[in-house]
Image (cartoon, rainbow, N blue to C red):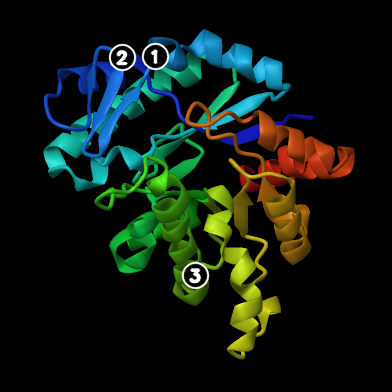
Amino acid sequence: MTSFDVHQHLWPEQFVAELARRTAPPYLADEELVLDEGRYPMPREVNDLSRRLELLDRDEIDVAVISLQPTLWTDALPLPERDALERAWVEGARELLASAGGRLLAFSPGRLEDGFVGASVGATALADLDGIASLLDELERRSAPLFVHPGPAPFPPGAPEWWPAIVDYPTQMHAAYFHWLASGRERWPTVRVVFAILAGGAPFQLERLAQRGRDVRSTLDPNVYLDVASYGRRSIGLCAQTFGAENLLYGSDRPVVDPAPTLKAVRGFGESMEKLITVDNPTALLR
């Protein structure tokens, strides 16, 4: 019985070196990540494979699924710069997967690569489904999942440092979820899609959708999954009441946030629900 964390970020050495060579955001200056909106600590140990496996052991999770976070603004870079960063991450991730003894899987950024379990895109990509149609066609053909993650968000003038994470990222995910419900799933009915951070709370809006005459039962789709990263018992419980727990997945968002409160909340629902969220549902997703 294998347990999974479907939402982690890990930078291989090749990607770290590519960031360190850059002089414009995103780039690394010593142990700081520099983005347009600010500078963030990035200690070397957070991307150490041995340390990451130790943390999996501590959390009693068997396998982590890693991805390259779109919040680095790579999508906004000129295509050659974006390709250089993504290629460095993909090539390095292959080495990490080979060295991890089966304890890592990965979503490849923007396209489906051999050896990866699926692909990831930024949330705003779902506003233009035609723009990612070839990727979705390939995922459908190969029965591989799509991971939808928040993308870059500029700071409004005078906003506090937590603004993007609390306001912009959930708003992006909310919109992505409803773009998929409105148009995507009819075109790609068998594609399995994971929306990070509970789709920004979008399921809480289904009651309002019912007020607009939509049969909410038709929005419940076994191929649509929500990861619970950064949320606690109340939010997870509300989503479980809406969907049932069969569409929820454990994600930690390590190393961006401390996963301990979320993991404690998942386990607080009891062994049966914990098994659904950490074992059964991710196994179905990654089949």
x and y, in percent, of residue 125 in the image: 34, 58
Identify which residue, 97 or 7, lies in the foreground.
7
Image height of 208 relative to 242, above or below = below
Quarter of the image where the C terminus is located:
top right
Mark found first going from the N terminus, 2 or 1: 2
Q: Residue at x 28, y 62 (%)?
A: 131
Residue 108 shown left or right of residue 58 in the figure: left
Q: Nearer the viewer, residue 18 or 134?
A: 18
At a point 88% along the width and 43% down the height, the residue shown is 272
Residue 29 visible, this orientation: yes
Query: How far apart are the alpha carbons under marks 2 and 1?
Result: 5 Å
Q: Quadrant of the N terminus?
A: top right
- The answer to whether mark 2 and mark 1 are in CB contact below 8 A is yes
Q: 10 Å neighbourhood of mark 3: few (<14), some, or many (≥20)?
A: some
- What number is the disc on residue 43? 1
Q: From the image, state whether disc 2 or disc 3 is nearer to you.
A: 2
Q: Which residue is mark 2?
A: 31
Tag of residue 178: 3
Residue at 46 percent of width and 31 percent of height: 115
